[in-house]
Image (cartoon, rainbow, N blue to C red):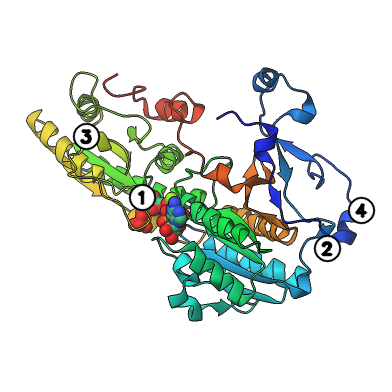
């Protein structure tokens, strides 16, 4: 998809007429390499070749609205009520984002009410409406020390009309949705219903996913914490496989469609000899196949460590009728167990009966509290989301793009998936670190 400047303009509910609590502080600020003025824009592209290829004058180059506080805001802070919802799979940092939003709204904007919806979009339905909780500084005081989300989360479809009824009933002016691609699709349906009724309600998204599969963002929050956790499991199977006769360590990591966790975790401790990701299909048999590589490695080094993303090699698994979860996400076959079986069979036949150590850390990598780096990232995203919502931005997501916090139209975040580029430098680093060929079986 070729982006034009007009595709990148975010929607706003109207003119900002109320004084912002940040007006005084902003009045003294000068634009610098470290501060983007609210009227300035951030370029999408960062290479000379791409910019030249655009062949457009600077003011027409694709660019993004800078996030951050405004001098004037759209909503009258004292009369504003806000809702927060967390949806989809867990991700380190959810509590940090909730806390950051509540603190910013309370300490600076002094809004009237902050409501938390329980268990994802389900909490906005008629059935669960009474479970809504009012959030204040006390409620979020030390929640950042815990993994998960104090609000709970869920998958599964909900009716947009019913959810908007809830927003109306509670008098919500801004809804913050912290979630992944599915959540943002849900948020767009809510926005559509808000528009159909002519309501003055802003919907602002904070993108969440441990898989790092959302586009137009440097890296999603929680990803760094998740892959750091994954690293520990790779280190374990490395130690185990090293101590065993023909030791084979296999670690299966989350990543439905994108292998970022597998790549980063493998690079982090450099113990992996083979990394398998959904973006690079592989074959088992033949001289260039995976089995031959594993056999050769075991012969030469007495052990091997394989890191596999859960979405890798799905084409090799027999699945009767693809199934989906409550949100419509594809349910995957178990590539980890499949590999365990195939490697054991092959090495045994090759006269190298293996000792296999198989780990599937699964939820253990995403249920932990955010590390310090992700916590900083989360609080900054939370601040950006609050400023965007108070300034009346809607149908908008706050992201960090090339280290700048910016606003993007919500539909862009669901427009495609961020994936490891087999031609890109990340995959090249993995190949360099593991010594594996660009692909198994050509
Ligand atoms: N196409 C869609 N339209 C409306 N709601 C959706 C859509 N896809 C997902 N959702 C809702 O968004 C929530 C989270 O989606 P899910 O895919 O489970 O997680 P994530 O947001 O992390 O991708 C669920 O309640 C789901 O029903
Ligand atoms: O939470 P569930 O339903 O078991 O789903 C597991 C999936 O959730 C993920 O953590 C991603 O979740 P999201 O789509 O909610 O971001 C994947 O890595 C994993 O495949
Ligand atoms: Mg998703």
Which residue bears the numbered disc 2? Answer: 20
In the rendered image of this protein, does residue 204 appear above or below residue 442? below
Can you say whether 351 is above or below 380 in the image? above
Residue drawn 53% across and 65% down? 85
Residue 441, by quadrant, is: top left
Instruction: Report x, y in % for residue 149.
Output: 49, 67
- Asked whether residue 402 is in view, the answer is no
Q: Earlier in the sequence, mark 2 or mark 1?
A: 2
Q: Disc 1 and disc 3: Cα gap in Å?
A: 19 Å
Tell me the crowding category of disc 2: few under 14, some 14 to 19, or many 20 or more residues within 10 angstroms, Cα based. many
- From mark 3 to mark 4, how far is it between C-alphas? 61 Å
| Residues at circles 4 and 1 in contact by the CB criterion of under 8 Å | no
Whether disc 1's CB lies below 8 Å from ligand 1 is answered: yes
First-in-chain label (4 vs 2) = 2
- As measured in the structure, the alpha-carbon distance from the residue carrying label 2 to the one carrying label 3 is 57 Å
From the image, tell me which residue sits under label 1.
Answer: 329
Q: Residue 46 vs residue 124: left or right?
A: right
Residue position marked by numbered label 4 in the rendering:
28
């Amino acid at each position: 998809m070729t982006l034009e400047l007009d595709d990148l303009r975010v929607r706003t509910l109207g003119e900002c007429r109320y004084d912002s609590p940040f007006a005084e502080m902003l009045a003294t600020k000068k634009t610098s390499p470290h501060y983007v003025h609210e009227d300035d824009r951030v370029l999408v592209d960062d290479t000379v070749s791409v910019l030249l290829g655009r062949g457009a004058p600077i003011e027409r180059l694709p660019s993004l609205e800078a996030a951050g506080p405004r001098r004037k805001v759209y909503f009258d802070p004292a009369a504003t009520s806000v809702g927060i919802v967390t949806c989809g799979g867990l991700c380190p940092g959810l509590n940090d984002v909730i806390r950051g939003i509540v603190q910013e709204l309370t300490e600076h904007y002094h809004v009237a009410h902050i409501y938390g919806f329980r268990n994802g979009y389900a909490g906005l339905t008629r059935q669960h409406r009474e479970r809504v909780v009012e959030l204040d500084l006390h409620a979020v005081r030390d929640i950042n020390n815990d993994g998960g989300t104090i609000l709970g989360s869920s998958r599964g479809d909900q009716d947009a009309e019913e959810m908007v009824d809830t927003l109306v009933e509670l008098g919500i002016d801004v809804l913050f949705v912290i979630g992944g691609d599915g959540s943002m699709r849900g948020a767009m349906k809510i926005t559509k219903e808000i528009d159909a009724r002519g309501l003055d309600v802003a919907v602002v998204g904070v993108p969440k996913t441990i898989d790092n599969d959302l586009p137009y963002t440097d890296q999603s929050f929680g990803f760094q914490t998740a892959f750091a956790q994954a690293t520990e499991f790779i280190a374990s199977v490395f130690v185990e496989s090293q101590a065993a006769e023909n030791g084979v360590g296999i670690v299966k990591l989350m990543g439905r469609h994108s292998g970022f966790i597998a790549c980063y975790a493998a690079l982090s401790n450099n113990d992996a000899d083979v990394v398998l990701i959904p973006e690079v299909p592989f074959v088992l048999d033949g001289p260039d196949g995976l089995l031959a590589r594993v056999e050769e490695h075991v012969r030469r080094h007495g052990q091997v460590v394989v890191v596999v993303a859960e979405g890798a090699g799905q084409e090799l698994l027999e699945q009767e009728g693809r199934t989906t979860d409550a949100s419509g996400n594809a349910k995957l076959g178990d590539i980890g167990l499949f590999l365990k079986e195939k490697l054991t069979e092959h090495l045994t036949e090759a006269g190298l009966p293996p000792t296999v150590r198989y780990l599937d850390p699964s939820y253990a990598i995403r249920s932990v509290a955010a590390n310090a780096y992700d916590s900083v990232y989360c609080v900054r995203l939370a601040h950006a989301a609050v400023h965007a919502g108070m300034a009346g931005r809607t149908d908008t997501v706050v992201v960090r793009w090339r280290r700048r916090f910016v606003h993007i139209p919500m539909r862009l975040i669901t427009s495609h998936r961020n994936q490891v580029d087999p031609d890109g430098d990340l995959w090249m680093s993995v190949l360099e670190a593991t010594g594996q060929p660009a692909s198994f079986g050509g």
